[in-house]
Image (cartoon, rainbow, N blue to C red):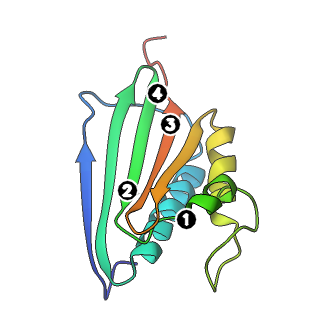
Amino acid sequence: FLRDRNITLKIDDFMERNATIHGDKKMIQQLLWNVALNGVQAMGEKGTLNIRTSQEGLLFVIQIIDSGSGVAKEHLPTVFKPFFTTKHKGTGLGLAICKRIVEQHQGNISLASEAGKGTTVTIMLPLHDISS
């Protein structure tokens, strides 16, 4: 989905050790795909998509940061609601599905954005303790 666009993909992995989460592989793939696709679509023909991972306590944190058009302040409270969209072609289900997937994995998803300056989606999922 980056073909024919001048979009740079950066992956920053700050994990000091391997992290393991329990979850449905296909659902997690859909989650990451939906968030990344939203970012790419918000950038149009040029920009940077940065994916960062880290650990905060017992949580695995994934941040997907785009340099796109951002989300207007008045839309921030509704971005995860079903059927909300600002796109001409869109169902408004992508982020609602993402929220449901994260919640089914006992995690949390949030979005920070400023119109014209891009968006950061933060996904926090519980780490699986492999020592137990």
Residue 36 in picture, x, y percent from top left: 45, 63
Q: Secondary structure at mark 1?
A: loop
| Res. 72 mark | 1
Separation of residues labelled 2 and 4 (CA atoms): 19 Å
Mark 3 — residue? 124
Q: CA distance from mark 3 to mark 2?
A: 14 Å
**Going 47% across and 26% down the picture, which residue do you hit?**
127
Image vertical order of residue 38 relative to residue 56, above or below:
below
Give the SS element for disc 2.
Answer: strand
Question: Which comes sooner in the sequence, label 3 or label 2?
Answer: 2
Give the answer, above or below, for where 86 lies relative to 117. below
Q: Residue furthest top?
A: 132
Q: Which residue carries the number 4 mark? A: 59
For residue 8, which quarter of the picture?
A: bottom left
Reading the image, the residue beneath label 2 is 65
Label located before the other in sequence (2 or 4): 4
The reply to whether dot 4 and dot 3 touch (C-beta < 8 Å) is yes
